[in-house]
């Protein structure tokens, strides 16, 4: 019996996350989309703020109980295009909590599920960064720092996750016309 692929996409209410989720769903992949608000779409949408570790743990516990999944795609992210000197502390914390800690919370909970599988299914974690990291774009210091952290985290996590038949990769797109 062939295994039906299923994925979890964070940040699925808009932008890159929504495009990935809709495209995958249209191609027969079971998609569970996580976002701060539930949306009407062609895939299952679940409300979850990835910056809340308790909410993430609860959702992933439910996902494990229901059907599991093969791939986590972390696209959830926020930015604030401000010069560093004018970026409020609260905005810095929000960016870091969503972009870095949200990616870590979701990855940790997904990897726990992948590590406990009895069957030898291959799994993946795909984290999103940005071309702004190597370009060190002016006006994006906090955003660039958060995505640089995602890249460093992903490189290290890839070494750990390989023990559980799980690949970890990063995609760093350039500018994309989204909201």
Image (tube, grey):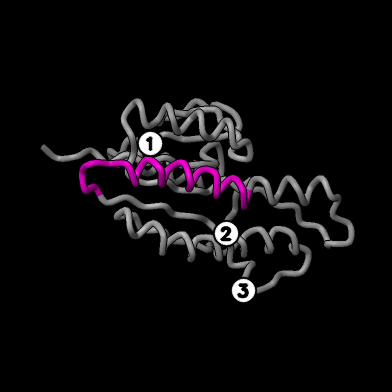
Please report the residue visible at 54 percent of the width from the left and 44 percent of the height from the top.
Answer: 105
Q: Is residue 46 magenta?
A: no
Q: Which residue is mark 2?
A: 150
Compute the Cα span from label 3 to label 2: 13 Å
| Residue at disc 3, secondary structure | helix
Judge from the rendering whether residue 172 lies leftward or rightward of residue 169; answer left or right.
right
Q: Which residue is mark 1?
A: 31
> Looking at the image, is mark 2 or mark 1 earlier in the sequence?
1
In the rendered image, residue 163, in percent from the top left (x then y), is placed at: 33, 58
Please tell me whether residue 155 is drawn above or below residue 114 in the rendered image: below
> Looking at the image, is mark 3 or mark 2 earlier in the sequence?
3
Q: Which residues are magenta?
A: 99-121
Q: Is residue 118 magenta?
A: yes
3 and 1 marks in contact (CB < 8 Å): no
Please report the residue visible at 76 percent of the width from the left and 56 percent of the height from the top.
Answer: 81
Please tell me whether residue 89 is drawn above or below residue 37 in the rendered image: below
Image quadrant assignment for residue 148: bottom right
Please report the residue visible at 73 percent of the width from the left and 45 percent of the height from the top.
Answer: 94
Question: Which of these two is toward me, 74 or 64?
Answer: 64
Please report the residue visible at 38 percent of the width from the left and 36 percent of the height from the top.
Answer: 31
Compute the Cα span from label 2 to label 1: 23 Å
- Between circles 2 and 1, the one closer to the viewer is 2
Image quadrant containing the N terminus: top left
Residue that sits furthest to the bottom in the current view: 135
| Residue at disc 2, secondary structure | helix
Q: Which residue is mark 3?
A: 134
């Amino acid at each position: 019996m062939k295994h039906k692929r299923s994925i979890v996409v964070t940040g699925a209410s808009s932008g890159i996350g929504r495009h990935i989720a809709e495209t995958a769903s249209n191609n027969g992949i079971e998609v569970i989309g996580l976002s701060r608000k539930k949306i009407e779409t062609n895939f299952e949408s679940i409300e979850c703020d990835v910056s809340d570790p308790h909410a993430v743990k609860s959702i992933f516990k439910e996902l494990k109980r229901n059907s599991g999944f093969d791939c986590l795609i972390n696209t959830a992210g926020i930015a604030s295009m401000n010069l560093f000197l004018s970026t409020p502390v609260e905005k810095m914390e929000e960016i870091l909590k969503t972009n870095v800690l949200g990616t870590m919370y979701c990855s940790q909970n997904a990897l726990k599920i992948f590590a406990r599988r009895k069957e030898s299914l291959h799994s993946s974690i795909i984290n999103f960064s940005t071309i702004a990291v190597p370009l060190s774009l002016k006006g994006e210091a906090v955003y660039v720092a958060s995505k640089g952290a995602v890249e460093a985290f992903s490189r290290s996590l890839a070494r750990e996750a390989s023990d559980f038949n799980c690949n970890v990769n990063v995609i760093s797109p350039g500018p994309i016309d989204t909201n």
